[in-house]
Amino acid sequence: MLLLSYSRSARNYNVRTSSFLLHLLEGILPCCPPGTYWGQYQDITKSNAHLSVAERLWVAWYAWVQNDVLATGIMSFAIHELFYFGRSLPWIFIDTLGLFKKYKIQSSKIPTLREQWDCAKFVLLSHFTVELPQIWLFHPMAQFFGLSTSIPFPSPWAMAYQIAIFFVMEDTWHYFLHRALHWGPLYKAIHKIHHQYSAPFGLAAEYASPIEVMILGFGTVSCPILWCAITGDLHILTMYAWIVLRLFQAIDAHSGYEFPWSLHHFLPVWAGADHHDLHHEKFIGNYASSFRWWDYLLDTEYTPDALKRRRERKVDAKKTQ
């Protein structure tokens, strides 16, 4: 049974902000049979008028499926596929149509449609054989650690600060594990597949061996779960928003394009495509996923400025000998 704990002011706010969508849905949807999803939605609407449209849709989904593990598994996998391939699609068009050529980092290396198609097939196979089983086990694991799938939804502020923390946590995990994967034996056995494309493109973000997908993907999932285990405060909606933003970050970092409006121009600690593209081109350095600070602090940054600093240190060291 879902627990509904709304104050009067919150109920009034939800009614006002969702009234337009409610009238729109009521006008579009006829009276649906009770066994259908929309029938469930209408039944919930009658008895829970104070809920927002999104919350009614959410409750109706779990009520219609009648199996929490199945409902979460289907929704999680659908979100992952929709946003991964949906975010990759614009980069496919940009590469294929030759748009924004002056912003292409490795301008002489444009992926062909054949390469894009082969990459898509490999990634899709990995999603169904490696990631889908993990996604299916996510609900029971998350419930064990106290993750909420009920309503009310968390506030935008709660979602924002938690996602910011997850970005920092995952970036740390990714830096050290990714750097470890560049150790000779591990690189040859695991990570070499991901470096098949020395000039990356969006779809190649998850082009990797099953072992690498599990190792680096574990950080994406386990950081929020660890937060939930410690604080007892995490909603699956926040988890979904985090996964979507992390997918966008990974795909954009592999896009191969550096724009004047790229985020790192406004947030200097952000890594971005120029940071990761050099990693693929040179096969060393720039190991972090989202931020630049670990590479800077541990001297694994591979940029013209970093190379200049290293040369100057060597010169200074020779002078002092």
Image: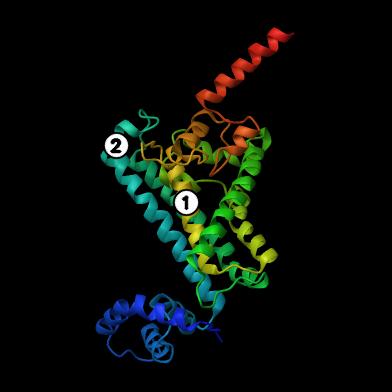
Q: Position of 174 compared to 85: left or right?
A: right
Q: Residues within 10 Å of mark 1 (few under 14, many from 20)?
A: many
**Which residue is the extreme one toward the right?**
321
Name the residue carrying label 1.
123
Is 133 in front, or is 62?
62
Q: Based on the displayed image, in which of its 4 quarters is residue 27 positioned?
A: bottom left
Marks 2/1: CA–CA distance: 26 Å
Residue under the point 57% across and 59% down? 162
- In the depicted structure, whether residue 49 falls above or below residue 195: below
The label number, if any, that marks residue 100 in the structure image:
2
Q: Position of 144 compared to 28: left or right?
A: right
**Which residue is the extreme one toward the front?**
9
Q: Position of 183 compared to 68: left or right?
A: right
Local secondary structure at mark 2 = loop
Is 77 in front, or is 41?
41
Residue under the point 45% across and 63% down? 79
* Quadrant that contains the C terminus: top right
- Percent across and percent down for residue 84 are 43, 55
Q: What amino acid is found at the position of numbered circle 2 in the picture? A: Phe
- Residue contact at pointers 2 and 1, CB within 8 angstroms: no
- Percent across and percent down for residue 6 are 50, 82
- Percent across and percent down for residue 179 are 64, 38
The label number, if any, that marks residue 237 in the structure image:
none
Residue under the point 62% across and 38% down? 294
Q: What amino acid is found at the position of numbered circle 1 in the picture? A: Val
- In the depicted structure, whether residue 30 falls above or below residue 235: below
Q: Residues within 10 Å of mark 2 (few under 14, many from 20)?
A: few
Local secondary structure at mark 1 = helix
* Quadrant that contains the N terminus: bottom right
Is 17 in front, or is 130?
17
- In the depicted structure, whether residue 226 falls above or below residue 278: below
Q: Earlier in the sequence, mark 2 or mark 1?
A: 2
